[in-house]
Amino acid sequence: MQAPLTPERLAATYDYLRVWPPFSRWGLPDSDAIIFRTTERRDCFGEITYEPLTIMASTALHWQVEPLMKTMAHEMLHLRQHLARTENRSQHNAEFKRIAKAICKRYGWHFGQFVGGV
């Protein structure tokens, strides 16, 4: 990435994806309702927590824009499932994988990277 990853850039990535299908149909909250933060962790690309609603991305693992887009889309899918109450104990349940496959097909992303790490 030419510029360092910041919470503001994470919010901008979220806002960008939020207006594209399928994200635009999900009724996701405005970025103002989410805390965006960065971390230097190397053990995960991104993470979402719900109390308070926070999306995190690793500065150590995002040095290009495309992986950041995949990570944000992945966390947005988790948020969709949380809001629809379709999550279960399996972090990536059958519904998650079905929707992830459709997202990957639409955007030309590799499904295994999307689900298991960018």
Image (cartoon, rainbow, N blue to C red):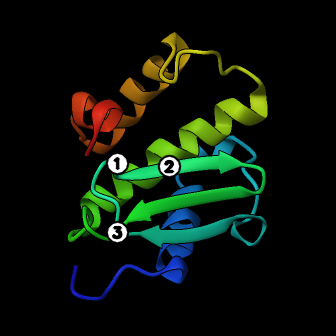
- Spatial CA distance of label 3 from label 2 is 13 Å
Q: Can residue 19 be seen?
A: no
Specify the quadrant that holds the N terminus: bottom left
Q: What element carries label 3?
A: loop
Q: Which amino acid does label 2 sit on?
A: Glu
- Spatial CA distance of label 3 from label 1 is 10 Å
Front-lying residue, 4 or 23: 4
- To which residue does mark 1 refer? 44
14 horizontally vs 39: left or right: right
Front-lying residue, 76 or 90: 90
- Measuring from the top left, give residue 8's x and y in whole percent: 54, 82
Front-lying residue, 46 or 11: 46
Which numbered disc, 3 or 2, marks the residue closer to the eye?
A: 3
Whether the residues at callouts 3 and 2 have beta carbons within 8 Å, the answer is no
Disc 3: CA contacts within 10 A as few (<14), some (14-19) or many (>=20): few
Number of marks in picture: 3
- Measuring from the top left, give residue 54's x and y in whole percent: 65, 58
- Spatial CA distance of label 2 from label 1 is 7 Å
- Measuring from the top left, give residue 104's x and y in whole percent: 32, 35
Rendered residue at 34%/52% (across/down) = 45
- To which residue does mark 3 refer? 40
Q: Which amino acid does label 1 sit on?
A: Cys
- To which residue does mark 2 refer? 47
- Measuring from the top left, give residue 34's x and y in whole percent: 71, 64
Residue 77: name its quadrant. top right
In the rendered structure, find residue 85 and report the number of the disc placed on it.
none
Rendered residue at 69%/41% (across/down) = 26
3 horizontally vs 14: left or right: left
Whether the residues at callouts 2 and 1 have beta carbons within 8 Å, the answer is yes
Task: Give the vertical position of 70 relative to 32 (above or below).
Answer: above
Task: Give the vertical position of 69 relative to 78 (above or below).
Answer: below
Task: Give the vertical position of 88 relative to 12 (above or below).
Answer: above
